[in-house]
Image (tube, helix red, strand yellow):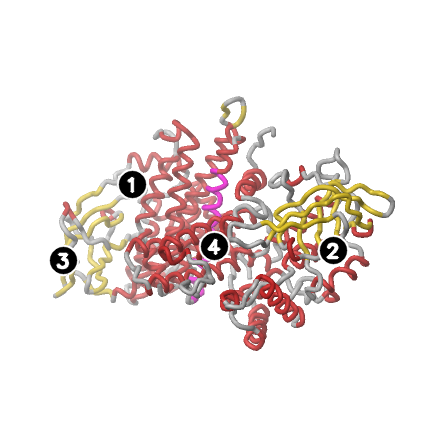
Amino acid sequence: MRFELSEDQALLRSSTRDFCQRELPIDKTRVVMEQSKDGYEPGMWRSFADMGYLGLLLPESVGGQVLGAIELAVVMEEMGRVCVPGPYLDAVLAASVLATAGGHEQLLAEIVSGRKLVVLARDDSPYRGNRAEPTRFSDGRVRGTKYFVPFGARADALLVVTSDGLVLVDAPGNMTALETMDQGQRFVAVALDHPATFVGPLSLLERIDQIGAVGAAAMLLGVMDRTLEITLDYVRTREAFGRPIGAFQVLQHRMADMLLRAESSRSAVYRGAWCCDTRVVETALACASAKAYAGDAARYVCGQAIQLHGGIGFTWELDLHFFFKRAKTLEQRYGATEAQLENALAAAGY
Amino acid sequence: MDLQLSPQHLAFREEVRGWLAANADRPWREVLRGSTATEDSLIEARRVWQRKLHGAGYLGMDWPAEWGGRGGGPVEQAILETELIEADAPPILNTLGIGLLGPALIHHGSEEQRRRFIPPMLAAEEIWCQGFSEPGSGSDLASLKASAVLDGDDFILNGQKVWTTFGPWADWIFVLARTDGKDRYGGISFILCKLDTPGITVRPLRQITGESEFGEVFFEDARVPRTNLVGEIGEGWRIAMTVLAYERGAISFTQAVQYGRDLGRLATACKEIGRTGSAVREKLGRLLVENEVMRANGIRTLANFADGKAPGAESSIEKVYWSEFDQRFRETALDLLGPGGQLVRTSPEARDDCDWARQFLWSRAETIFSGSSEVQRNIIAKRVLKLPQDPR
């Protein structure tokens, strides 16, 4: 038994931390998030490809790295530490679905090399207050409205979830930008009445949803880790009543609780990832628990980070709000807490 | 990363399972509810069970072989404990002797002390209680005042100990006593006292559960031979701290097994009594998730043990997590079960799956004993987060 990462995994962590610090420092990301219409820098996608991130889970035949959920968690955790914007996890998950379905070699090779972006379109639209209508696939056409499609405006193709299975559709028009509070996550709504090709049954999503939950929870872990570091630095230097505020027991206990949540998330994330890779019976329960817990934990940690900074924590100038917003976005996506609680209950047979 | 038990550990688990299948008695929860059960009969049952475990070599597993140890470590210990939980076996009787004093004697005692005290401790012939806390010294344990003054070949003890678990039915007590009034930590010594010594009085204290598991112990000019000193004079604090580290172990791992079992019983109970609404399910779901995260914390600690890493101050995180989780769990259980959850276990109407009312009350002790939640958070802030310390 061993909790520590293997030598290769530890190398992946250090190279990813270097890459993120060099190529994706938060000062640069801040400008991209504030000014780019895409919410991320598509030019970075080639660097992601060079680092092997885009084909992390994919087979060698399409240029992938044939790695697993632990490695994905390592990369996501490091990306969380600098609040990386863009559709990274979305691209990884969509590619994994295509690879599991079989075929699509050409498209997968283009995804791995960063030339094409495919994302999942899942949520059926309750657009303008109407009740959600299921998206259908029949006679070679996909019909319906998808809501909150991540980075749909940049996607070359969408992998659409319909009640008749998963279908692939070339980048359709008719997109409406849905601007949210997280500047590093861009969404669109898309009205579909387009020719599409059948990819496979909905059961393809089962394993991908577990990996997605672990990946998102890992990014939440990185978000928590970095937010706590920023806060610890602040309370050691900021003085009030003649001493560093970090010496006050009431704040110390708060930070002990922040650490408890971050470290417990770490245990849960890596256990979940290990379960995914080992395909043990407790995988569903472990993944659902990691995501549900990390979502709550990150909201707490990021919220308390703002609280402990006081007024400056509420300013746009400080980086904390980017982490705070990302925590909320991730909590809602890749299986929101409510859905993960149901998954956990089902897995336990309650 | 490898979170699977090794083949040797799996083999050990199989061995324990086989032994339990052949040797385990009635489930303990049935014994507790039995119409003839008294406090004395339950103690006797625990004594008998401890002897059985000792006979099979399952006590003090990480001790040297001559004391019944078998070269096992914390992983074997955790496996054994989880299997005992699964089998609903009785608790052993000499918990504090084997959990705390045994390691203290092995690491700090004299050869003579080990020969004199360890065999009857393992055989449950001499039951031990722990004399650390005092009415004026709880979280600030090092402020303790009970005194031991050397007089010829004896110490003369005066003072009072309290919250002495097992005090009312123990034969011996290990005491932290002050041998030097000026040296806060270096003035404390670790002394073994027989409870029928003239000048020592034990009084039971009734707990909020109605049980008198703990008591208070008074020392009035009690004369104890100097040979009962463990280690040197003034080494008591250091011995106590190393011994307390043994109390921790991979506790989240074993607790998650117990809570998982009780959580399953709670889920079944909710179905039986028709409480299946979404508000109920959300509560169950949250408990389930929190217990799985605790299990993950436990697996991580266990894997670190197996990897040769001793736990540091992070064990404070585990203590806060499991004790506060148990309170949420037991409170929620009583909410979900309705008034029936408050029935005492001997009530004919009480559910026989778990003593919900007792566990609800007991959970209040867990955030106090063995370092309160507040003390644990101080430790995390100081030793893990390394935050600046206020002059106290």
Distance from the alpha carbon under mark 2 to that under mark 3: 76 Å
Lateral position of residue A241 relative to residue A289, left or right: right
Depth check, front residue: A156 or A348? A348
* Same chain assignment for discs 4 and 1: no
Residue B329 placement (x, y as % from top left): 43, 53
Establish if A244 lies above or below A171. above
- Neighbor class of circle 1 (other Cα within 10 Å; few <14, some 14-19, many 20+) is many
Q: Which residue is labeled 1 in the image? A: A39
Say which of marks 2 and 4 sits in front: 2
> On residue B105, which mark appears?
2
In terms of secondary structure, where does tag 3 sit?
A: strand
Lateral position of residue B86 relative to residue A315, left or right: right
Residue range highlighted in magenta: A254-280
Say which of marks 1 and 2 sits in front: 2
> On residue A2, which mark appears?
none
Depth check, front residue: A278 or A196? A278
Distance from the alpha carbon under mark 1 to that under mark 2: 64 Å
Callout 1 amino acid: Gly
Say which of marks 2 and 3 sits in front: 2
Q: Which sits earlier in the primary sequence, circle 1 or circle 3?
A: 1
Lateral position of residue A158 relative to residue B96, left or right: left
* Same chain assignment for discs 2 and 3: no
Asked if labels 2 and 1 touch by Cβ distance under 8 angstroms, the answer is no
Residue B136 placement (x, y as % from top left): 63, 38
